Amino acid sequence: MWRNAVPVVIAAQRSPPDSIDASPSAAQRTLWIALLSALARRRLPRRDLGALACQAVSGRIELAVVATAIIAVRTTLAALSQVVINAAAVFHTSLYLSDMHPFLDDAAARAPKRGSRTHAAPTEEIRLEEVVYQYPGRDKPAVDGVSLALRRGQILAIVGANGSGKSTLTRLLIGIYLPDKGRVTWNGTDLAEVDPATVWANTGLVPQIFAQWPLRVRESVTLGQPRTHNDAPVWEAVDAVGLREAVEDLPAGLDTLLARDVFGGQWQRVACSRALYRRPGLLILDEPTSQMDPRGEHQIFEQIKAIAADRITIMVTHRLENTKIADHIVVMEHGRITEQGWYDGLVHAGGTFAELLELSQDR
Ligand SMILES: Nc1ncnc2c1ncn2[C@@H]1O[C@H](COP(=O)(O)OP(=O)(O)OP(=O)(O)O)[C@@H](O)[C@H]1O
Ligand SMILES: [Mg+2]
C-alpha cells in the first residue's frame, strides 16, 4: 500500500495539497468544540459559591450538604472538561484520518501499473536498455539513454559528479521507478511486468539517505526479514561491518534500543549490516561509507569483495580509490554514461575519471 504513495509525494512537490478539509463547516465544528472545551474548563463561579455560603450561614442548608454540593459540582465539571478535551483531540485527529483515505486512493491511481509475474532467484542477469527517466516537473531527464548489462558475480561501480543520475539509476535498476522509455529486465523479464515485491525480496539496498530506525540492534539488522530466535546470523552481519565491539559495549548488547548511543558512521554500518543480513541477489550500496573511518571503509569493501561471487553488486561512490575492487566502472555525466571500463584502464584514459581521481589526490 505504502509504495503507491511515492508518486503522490512527488506530485505534492509540484502542487499544494487540495485534499485538506478547509471547508467552512469544518471550521465551524472546530469552533464549537473549542467553545465547549473552554466552557467546560470554567471553574465554579465565585457568585454561586457566595450564594451557597449565605444559605449555609443563614441555616437554610446544612454545611455538609453545601460541602457535598461543591465537591459534586467540581468533580462533574472536571469530568466534563476531560470528556470535551478528549472529544476535541479525537475530532482533530479525525481530520487527518479523513485526508488519509483520499490520499491513498489518489496514490493508487497514480502508481505505475505493473504486472503480476514473479521474479525467482537466483538473479543471473540484469539489463538496462536505452533507459530514460525524467522526474515530474523537471525539464531534463535524470537518466538519459543508459544501457548496461550486469551478470552474477560482477561488481559494478558507478561514479560521477553530484546530480549526474547515479542514485536515480539505482532506483530504476530495482524498479522503484519505471523508465519513461527503454526497459529494465531481470533474468530477461521486463520489470514493468513483475510484481515488485518479488524483486525487492531479492534486493539489499543501502540508500544514500537512510532511515535511522529507533529499534533494538537485533531488529535493526533483521528488519523486514522473518523473525529469528537464532542470533548467530545477526552477529555474522554485525561482524561483517566491524560493529561487534561497539554492540558489545552497548548497555544491553543486541537488545539495546538504538538512539543516542549510535553516531554517523555507526548508523551506516547498521544499514550495511541490514543489507548483508538479507544475503540478496542484488546488493546496492549508494555512498555506503561516506561517514566511516578508513578502517571501517576498508572492512566494508573487503566484505563486499568476499561475498561478491554469489550476487550482482553495485556500489556508488565519490571515493574513486574504492572502485579498484570493481570489475566494471561507469562514469555518469548529466544522466548519461560517458566513460566505462576498469580501474587501470580509466586511470590512463585521460578522461573524466582520471581528472576526478587526480583532483581527489591533489589535496
Ligand atoms: N525526487 C526528485 N524529484 C525531482 N528531481 C530529482 C529528484 N531526485 C533527484 N532529482 C534530480 O535528478 C538529477 C539526478 O539526481 P541523482 O540524485 O540521481 O544524482 P546523483 O548522481 O545520485 O547525485 P549525488 O552525487 O549528489 O548523490 C538531479 O538533477 C536531481 O536534482
Ligand atoms: Mg546520489
Image (cartoon, helix red, strand yellow):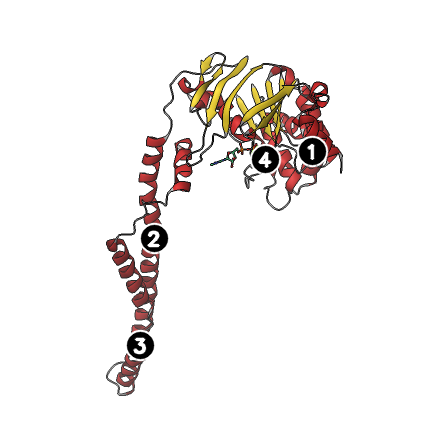
Q: Earlier in the sequence, mark 4 or mark 1?
A: 4
Q: Which residue is mark 2?
A: 92
Query: Picture quarter containing residue 71?
Result: bottom left
The picture places residue 262, in percent across and down from the top left corner, at 64, 42
Could you tell me which residue is drawn at 28 percent across and 76 percent down? 65
> Which dot, 1 or 3, sits closer to the camera?
1
Q: Which residue is mark 3?
A: 45
Cβ at disc 3 under 8 Å from ligand 1: no
Q: Residues within 10 Å of mark 1 (few under 14, many from 20)?
A: some
Query: Picture quarter containing residue 319?
Result: top right
Q: Nearer the viewer, residue 133 or 220?
A: 133
Check the image and report above or below for 61 versus 219. Answer: below
Gap in Å between the C-alphas at discs 4 and 2?
42 Å
Q: Residues within 10 Å of mark 2 (few under 14, many from 20)?
A: few
Gap in Å between the C-alphas at discs 4 and 1?
33 Å
Q: Which residue is mark 4?
A: 162
The picture places residue 3, in percent across and down from the top left corner, at 42, 31
Residue type, mark 3 in image = Pro
The picture places residue 119, in percent across and down from the top left corner, at 46, 16
Gap in Å between the C-alphas at discs 3 and 4?
67 Å
- Left or right: residue 27 versus residue 160 is left
Could you tell me which residue is drawn at 55 percent across and 17 percent down? 148
Gap in Å between the C-alphas at discs 1 and 3?
65 Å
Q: Earlier in the sequence, mark 3 or mark 4?
A: 3
Q: Nearer the viewer, residue 77 or 166?
A: 166
> Which dot, 4 or 2, sits closer to the camera?
4
Cβ at disc 4 under 8 Å from ligand 1: yes
Cβ at disc 2 under 8 Å from ligand 1: no
Q: Which residue is mark 1?
A: 244
Q: Are marks 4 and 2 in contact (CB under 8 Å)?
A: no
Residue type, mark 4 in image = Asn
